Image: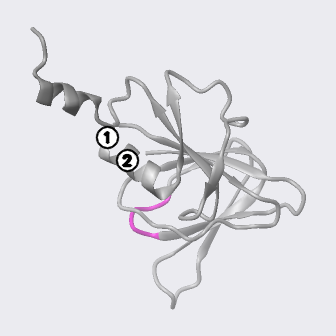
Amino acid sequence: MPLDEASAKRYARKSAFLEFCQRDGLAVISGYGVDDLKAAPLKQWERLGGRAAYCHLEGSQGFVGVLVAEIPPGKSLKPIRHMYEEQVLILSGRGATQFWTDENREPMTLEWQPGSLFSPPLNVKHQHHNGSATESVRLATAN
């Protein structure tokens, strides 16, 4: 049964999140897989304060997304918080993530290295820091 014109347009339209990525300047990697997240091409994304790309895999139905980001030597990404579950996998480099709930408390610090996997608590501000003055950090976050 052929689709009517309105249905065809709806199916051809990008998701609201992919439209956001385009407007906000976040690079998108599409396809059925990514050969090597450590070598995936990234682009500066001001919202994060570093280079990043969103991996939009065909067949995922938009239920799982992966953001790949890089932290330059001796630098930090901008503080963030979100209302969705996220897992962070450190692909390369060493550093730390600080977590805090308000300005009056000392942040809790988690140090990490390649292969570390952790999940920031919901709605808690956190900031990723590169612990090396000479090597970049590459991380992947899945939500």
Is the residue 133 above or below the residue 106 in the image? above
The residue carrying mark 1 is 15
Classify 10 Å Cα crowding around label 1: few (below 14), some (14-19), many (20 and above). few
In the picture as drawn, the residue positioned furthest to the top comes out as 1
Q: Nearest the camera: 14 or 114?
A: 14
Q: Is residue 135 left or right of residue 101?
A: right
Q: Is residue 40 left or right of residue 24?
A: right
Classify 10 Å Cα crowding around label 2: few (below 14), some (14-19), many (20 and above). few
Magenta stretch holds residue 123: yes
Overall secondary structure of the magenta section: loop
Residue at left 57%, top 62%? 48
Q: Amino acid at mark 1?
A: Ser
Image quadrant containing the N terminus: top left
Gap in angstroms between the C-alphas marked 2 and 1: 6 Å
Q: Position of residue 82 (x, y in %)?
A: 41, 62
Magenta residues, start to end:
120-124
Is the residue 40 above or below the residue 48 in the image? above
Dot 1 falls on a residue whose secondary structure is: loop
The residue carrying mark 2 is 19
Q: Are marks 2 and 1 in contact (CB under 8 Å)?
A: yes
Is the residue 120 above or below the residue 79 in the image? above
Number of marks drawn: 2
Residue at left 80%, top 53%? 136
Dot 2 falls on a residue whose secondary structure is: helix
Q: Amino acid at mark 2?
A: Glu
Q: Position of residue 35 (x, y in %)?
A: 65, 24
